[in-house]
Amino acid sequence: MVSESLSITPLFSGSSGNSILVQTRGRKLLVDAGQNCKKIVEALSTLSVMPDELSAILITHDHIDHISGLDVFTRKFGIPIFATSSTWRGIHAAERKPHDEALDHTISTGETFTIEDIEITAFDTPHDADGSCGYRFSSEGKSVAIATDIGWMTPIVFESLRGCETVLLEANYDKDMLWNGEYPYYLKKRIDGENGHLCNDDCAKTMVALCKAGTKHFILGHLSKENNLPQVAERTVLRAMEEEDLFRDRDFTLQVANRYIPTLPLF
């Protein structure tokens, strides 16, 4: 969702499941498979994409809302999978039946690899899943990035996002909604901790800095159903932007990834 040469389209986003389509002129990748196989296929079909058109599936980490459909999907369609070694341990532990090991590719964060015409860099993300990572994609002079499940905005994550034309960034929770909500204390601490999720305020601060560094298109992703609302997350970002004399549709575009259906571009 950025240009003709490189685009990202969230298929689903949130604790109920996450999956994102990355496309260039000739190649298509899937990031995460956090809904069941049938729903992923249906979501792809709304974008006129068939599963056998996918060159690869990249996994950010092994939590169920990112891999729940991977087991069936990969056995049914035989798409190569890329993940860190720690994430692979979680994937194999969760699968009901083994798939063809020739499809397994182990990657390392901080290193760049290529899938056909797309250059990809995986970067460490602070989350309570070993091997958790985000991804930056580059093709034909354009770059986009995906970063969710982030306890805090580390220098590594920020530098991995800097300079991208489009960024999908987590806006998981509103602090007041979380701490005044019904979650048990231990879960509130986990979400608000350094290995939990990114709140609206920290997301907004990051987007201000990225916008000043040249990012033009933003997608808010992985919103909590219980501790956030799309309008609350959006309002927080817009307020922070306006305080820095940055205005929607003049300096940047902004949209919130839909929880259940593909999010089509605004531009």
Image (tube, rainbow, N blue to C red):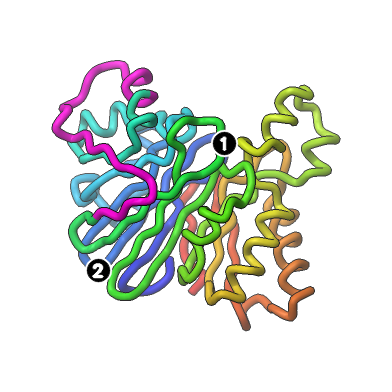
Residue 24: percent from left, percent from top: 28, 65
- Tell me if residue 84 is in the magenta stretch: no
Going from the N terminus, do you reach mark 1 or mark 2 first?
1
Residue 137: percent from left, percent from top: 36, 60
Residue 256: percent from left, percent from top: 59, 57
At label 1, counting other C-alpha atoms closer than 10 Å, the crowd grade (few under 14, some 14-19, many 20 or more) is some
**Which label sits on residue 15?**
1
Q: Is residue 188 above or below residue 13?
A: above
What range of the chain is rendered magenta? 90-113
For the point 75% across and 61% down, the residue is: 235
Q: Is residue 257 above or below residue 68?
A: below
For the point 51% across and 57% down, the residue is: 168
**Which label sits on residue 233?**
none
Nearer to us in this view, 190 or 159: 159
Q: Is residue 260 visible?
A: no
Q: Is residue 249 above or below residue 11?
A: below
Q: Is residue 141 visible?
A: yes
**Element marked by disc 2:** loop
For the point 53% across and 70% down, the residue is: 217
Query: Please, what is the three-letter code of the amino acid marked with disc 1?
Result: Ser
Q: Is residue 241 above or below residue 235?
A: below
| Drawn side of residue 136 relative to residue 192, left or right | left
| Drawn side of residue 199 relative to residue 214, left or right | right
| Drawn side of residue 1 relative to residue 219, left or right | left
At label 2, counting other C-alpha atoms closer than 10 Å, the crowd grade (few under 14, some 14-19, many 20 or more) is few
Query: Please, what is the three-letter code of the amino acid marked with disc 2?
Result: Arg
Reading the image, the residue beneath label 2 is 25
- Tell me if residue 110 is in the magenta stretch: yes
**Element marked by disc 1:** loop
For the point 63% across and 36% down, the residue is: 196
Residue 218: percent from left, percent from top: 56, 65
- Number of marks in the rendered image: 2
